[in-house]
Image: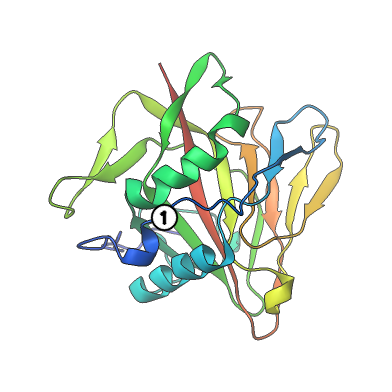
Amino acid sequence: MGGVVHETPVHAFESTPSCLALGPQPSLQPRRHDIDLGGYLAFFIDDVVTAAEADCIVAASEHFGYREEAPGISTPPGMRMNKSVHWVADEALLGPIMQRIQPLLPPAIGGAALHGRLSHRINMYRYDDNDVFNRHIDGDWPGYGLDPSRRWMQEWSGLRSCLTMLLYLNDPSDGVVGGNTQLLGRDGRWVEVTPRKGAALFFRHGFSPDSVPHIGARVSGAVPKYVARINVLYGD
């Protein structure tokens, strides 16, 4: 129901699991599809990760364990009604993902240039039966990574996120019922995006008039929906 719970953890692996060290995937052909939101920035990219890579990310998140609270994040009561786990990955996972999508990302936003790395902090959500994330906008974040000991999270100076990347980790073919992402356009129209396993939805975020209001629609049934929020960084 919102509110910060003291000492909610942010996790990391002591060493990168082999299935999270991504390699080349010649079968993937990422393609960008722009979404008309009446002037807001939003687009969809197919083929970001393989189905097996998506399954491994889900398994990693379940290894850490989901909670109703999220670390250091407060939302109004009744807004975020799902389960969360935050963890810090590394370049072995996120570097190859960035290489796959970088040519399709805006090279600059608001005068700031695209940074060559995705933030390593991954905010994951699991939507169980009847879970929903009601209308909201996503705040912007600094970049984060692990220190050399992999015990502490470090903030990357001079960078802020400008785009949310919602990486869909399962979809209706896995039995997910509901759970579409609903985007509210500048012109007042709602646009629905159906999750597609291995694809990602991108949209402008931050506390500005350009941030896209959206809803994580209600999920029904026994199969949960999994999605990873990853922040796309921009800076000088």
Identity of the amino acid at label 1?
A: Leu
In the image as oriented, which residue stretches furthest toward the left?
149
Toward which corner of the image does residue 65 lie, by quadrant?
bottom left
Vertically, is 144 above or below 228? above
Toward the viewer: 191 or 22? 22
The residue that appears at 47% across and 50% down in the rendered structure is 24
Q: Is residue 224 left or right of residue 36?
A: left
**234 vs 51, nearest the viewer:** 51
**Which residue is drawn at the image coordinates 70% and 31% (left, top)?**
41
Q: Residue 86 at what x, y percent from top left?
A: 38, 59
Q: Residue at x 69, y 73 (%)?
A: 219
The secondary structure type at the circle numbered 1 is loop
Residue toward you, 93 or 138: 93
Would you say residue 73 is visible in this rendering?
A: no
Image height check: is 205 above or below 215?
above
Residue 151 visible somewhere in the drawing: yes
For disc 1, the marked residue is: 22
x and y, in percent, of residue 205 in the image: 58, 36
Image location of residue 20, percent across then percent down: 38, 61
